[in-house]
């Protein structure tokens, strides 16, 4: 699970696009041997074999300097760490012993014990008694055992990720406790907020597991956190639904501040309990899911399989309310217009509709709109371009005609992109008219 600390929704989206394939993927090898669901898929290949290994703990500069024996990348792309440097990376209630080419590592957090062991030339990792298949093996070289950092690290609850742009390995300390916050009141009022925690182990989205330690009083969670050493890592997860049941921003921030005030390292993330059908298609998986959540919150449905002629303009900003304008062309040459504005972003910040209006376009107005699409050659526009950035807003323009579907997606189109900008201007003018 990705960590987000003080980032905007848009930053979260960029990171998701950038690291999705090498950070959040899980290995699902079909085998009779159980597999740890969070193990990495090593898609960074053997072309790294001759590269120098740089390991950073904060994503800014390589800050682990190893003297003597050096880590290296093996033929699968795994980071092979000599055990002589284990203590330099792995800190906090962790110890290990090596016996007959096997290393056994024990992590103890508040009496929750995790035991991981690997053996030279074996692709089996044992985690708390369960065998896990790795796609590489530890190696014994000149009397020193080298272990695959991605597999051993993540099995112990550490984050080990490859940054393919900066070309270094990012290494994050494990989370001592996972804190969860959600709201059981549909109206999102503070009185429905619940808290829970899981000590060490794995971050989970299983509500049955999360509710094991459920409480209405955050002091119950703080009583557990007080037993941790200063500087221990805490990941706080806000659980939300696409419509209602949201944790108010101020309440969530208070919890984050209280954890930091205890001298603990606090980071945060969120996830949605609602599994929505994809309303958008033909973009990347991450964007399809993001836009679909936003449109689901606005009571929109997929139009790509429609037999009618429909056009939809969707506006997804970082710091204001999203809106959608949908134009449905009728057989008599007129058009119906549907306009909705949301209650904050569905991505953890709200969801639902704050305003909804309908209108009609005359035959002349409808022809004016269709002529704009012809003039801008909408159906020939590329689906995406290379322009991407932080904050700002994204626009998505869809069209379906004669059962053919086309979609374009742009970040902050401006007058420099006259074609898309002119379509955006039309929909913004229509929105402004409906707002009045």
Image (tube, helix red, strand yellow):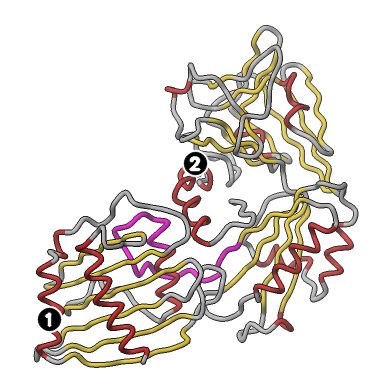
Q: Where is residue 37 in the image (x, y as percent from the top left)?
A: 58, 47
SS category of the residue bearing label 1: helix
Q: Where is residue 151 in the image (x, y as percent from the top left)?
A: 61, 34
SS category of the residue bearing label 2: helix
| Quadrant where the image shows the C terminus | bottom left
Query: Which residue is rendered at x = 50% and y = 19% of the image?
Result: 51
Q: Name the residue under label 1.
A: 368
Q: What stretch is highlighted in magenta?
A: 270-289
Instruction: Name the disc covering residue 302, or none.
Output: none
Q: Does the magenta stretch include residue 287?
A: yes
Residue 416, quarter of the rendered image:
bottom left
Query: Which residue is rendered at x = 76% and y = 49% of the image?
Result: 233
Q: Position of residue 227 (x, y in %)?
A: 90, 53
Alpha carbon separation for disc pair 2 and 1: 47 Å
Q: Name the residue under label 2.
A: 22
User: Which one is nearer the viewer's eye here, 190 or 130?
Assistant: 190
């Amino acid at each position: 699970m990705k960590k987000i600390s003080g980032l905007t929704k848009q930053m979260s989206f960029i990171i998701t696009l950038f690291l999705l394939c090498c950070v959040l993927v899980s290995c699902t090898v079909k085998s009779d041997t159980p597999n740890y669901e969070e193990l990495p898929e090593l898609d960074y290949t053997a072309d790294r074999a001759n590269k120098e290994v740089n390991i950073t703990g904060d994503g800014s500069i390589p800050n682990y300097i190893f003297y003597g024996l050096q880590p290296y990348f093996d033929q699968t792309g795994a980071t092979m760490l000599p055990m002589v440097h284990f203590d330099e990376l792995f800190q906090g209630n962790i110890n290990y012993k090596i016996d007959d080419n096997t290393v056994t590592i024990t992590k103890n957090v508040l009496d929750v014990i995790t035991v991981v062991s690997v053996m030279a030339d074996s692709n089996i990792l044992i985690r708390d008694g369960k065998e896990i298949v790795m796609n590489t093996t530890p190696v014994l070289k000149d009397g020193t055992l080298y272990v695959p950092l991605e597999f051993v690290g993540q099995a112990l609850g550490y984050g080990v990720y490859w940054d393919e742009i900066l070309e270094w390995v990012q290494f994050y300390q494990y989370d001592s406790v996972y804190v969860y916050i959600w709201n059981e009141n549909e109206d999102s009022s503070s009185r429905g907020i619940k808290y829970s925690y899981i000590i060490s182990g794995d971050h989970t989205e299983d509500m049955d597991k999360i509710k094991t330690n459920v409480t209405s009083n955050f002091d119950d969670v703080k009583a557990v956190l007080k037993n941790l050493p200063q500087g221990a890592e805490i990941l706080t997860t806000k659980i939300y639904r696409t419509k209602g049941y949201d944790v108010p921003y101020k309440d969530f921030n208070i919890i984050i501040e209280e954890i930091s005030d205890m001298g603990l390292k606090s980071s945060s993330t969120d996830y949605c309990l609602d599994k929505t059908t994809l309303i958008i298609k033909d973009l990347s998986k991450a964007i399809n899911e993001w836009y679909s959540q936003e449109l689901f919150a606005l009571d929109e449905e997929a139009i790509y399989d429609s037999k009618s002629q429909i056009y939809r303009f969707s506006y997804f900003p970082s710091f204001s309310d999203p809106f959608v304008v949908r134009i449905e062309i009728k057989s008599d040459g007129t058009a119906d217009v549907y306009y909705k504005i949301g209650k904050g972003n569905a991505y953890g910040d709200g969801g639902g509709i704050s305003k909804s209006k309908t209108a009609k376009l005359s035959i002349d107005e409808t022809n004016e709109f269709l002529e704009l699409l012809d003039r801008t050659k909408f159906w020939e526009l590329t689906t995406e371009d290379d322009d991407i950035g932080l904050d700002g807003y994204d626009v998505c323009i869809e069209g379906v005609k004669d059962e053919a579907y086309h979609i374009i997606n742009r970040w902050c189109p401006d007058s420099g992109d006259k074609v898309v900008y002119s379509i955006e201007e039309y929909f913004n003018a229509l929105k402004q008219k409906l707002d009045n």
